[in-house]
Amino acid sequence: MLEQPGLPLNSTKNYSFSWAFVWLLLGVFILSFGAIFTRLSENELGPAATSFNRYYIATIVLALWEGTQYGMNNSSNPNKSIQLKDWGIFLLSSVLGTATIFLWALSLTQTSVANSNLLHNFTPIFAVLGGWLFFGQRFDYKFVLGMTLAIIGVAIISFGDFQEAVNSLYGDCLALLSAVFYALNYLVRENLRSKFSASTILLRTCLLGGCFTFLITLTTETQLFPTSWQTWLTVISLGVLCQIIGQGLLIHNLKQFSSGFVTLLMLIEPLLTALFAWVIFGEKLSPLNWIAFFLILTGIYIAKLSIGSVKLTEETSGD
């Protein structure tokens, strides 16, 4: 039976849902620092090398964690075996994730930052369409209304940065394609989450993603590893904070929330970036920005009340 967020079957489920939403928000908050860490890393490394270091550091930490957990819980909580089909899905997720990063980075060289960010943030639309087409997920008018309001809010934030007379159709298409791949990746992750724990998904996808970005770095860039302690600290932060904790919290909560709602919640990132710029760098926020913030938060709140935000069934898998 479908459980709506505002009408839990009992107080325990309501408590669990509330905490899951809080952890989801924390994951988005942590991921909002990813662009800052990436920009700092790219003062020394190229984008491919930055991604490679992010992946392999996360892989090492996750492998140590999984080894420790296996030794402690081998007899009481064995991990589900990974079949050849599962490895194919892990590979697909890694390809989609790597393609998303590459296409978005490439779009930034072919169009304005505002255009790229706006089109890349169309991810929830494609996640909803994919969930409806491939998994039979249902989204009522509240979810669609909330998603529309949130995307309009993101568009308003980007509006002030649009450049006139920019011939950027190619770059715009790349940014839109990155949104498609990003949405598909979360749909694949949602499928994996029905069987595997978040740490298992992260470890395998980071391992494969590291292999892809290693090959890209060798063929396109000259430096593979950082040389300064500042850049080492930056890529470690990317690997541990953003990749493991931030992405881990989002993947973990795909057990309870739909991929459409998770990607919708990630529209908070532009809002957080603007607020960070206001607090840290003293950048002014116009009345239009505050209207945009209101639209984003209102849209997410409305979507949270809809039947499209939660999973239709409770499945059993690892933690």
Image (tube, rainbow, N blue to C red):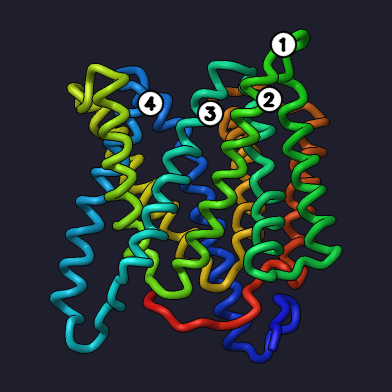
Tell which of 214 and 22 is nearer to you: 214
Mark pair 4, 1: CA separation: 24 Å
Please report the residue visible at 46 percent of the width from the left and 69 percent of the height from the top: 193
**Residue bearing mark 4:** 47
Name the element at disc 4: helix
Residue found at the very far top of the displayed protein? 165
**Residue bearing mark 1:** 166
Q: Tell me whether the residue at label 1 lies in contact with that at label 2, contact meaning CB atoms closer than 8 angstroms.
A: yes
Mark pair 2, 4: CA separation: 20 Å
Q: Is residue 100 above or below residue 316?
A: above
Category of crowding for the residue at label 3, using alpha-carbon neighbours closer than 10 angstroms: few (below 14), some (14–19), many (at least 20):
few
The image quadrant of residue 273 is top right
Name the element at disc 1: loop
Mark pair 2, 3: CA separation: 24 Å
Which amino acid type is shown beneath numbered disc 1?
A: Val
**Marks 1 and 3, the one that precedes in the sequence:** 1
Q: Position of residue 101 (x, y in %)?
A: 47, 35
Q: Is residue 213 above or below residue 148?
A: above
**Which circle marks residue 315 in the picture?**
none
Q: Tell me whether the residue at label 4 lies in contact with that at label 1, contact meaning CB atoms closer than 8 angstroms.
A: no
Please report the residue visible at 77 percent of the width from the left and 10 percent of the height from the top: 164
Q: Position of residue 88 (x, y in %)?
A: 37, 59
Please report the residue visible at 31 percent of the width from the left and 20 percent of the height from the top: 220
Category of crowding for the residue at label 1, using alpha-carbon neighbours closer than 10 angstroms: few (below 14), some (14–19), many (at least 20):
few
Name the element at disc 2: helix
Category of crowding for the residue at label 4, using alpha-carbon neighbours closer than 10 angstroms: few (below 14), some (14–19), many (at least 20):
many
Mark pair 1, 2: CA separation: 10 Å
Name the front one of labels 1 and 3.
Answer: 1
**Which circle marks residue 115 in the picture?**
2
Q: Position of residue 283 (x, y in %)?
A: 63, 22
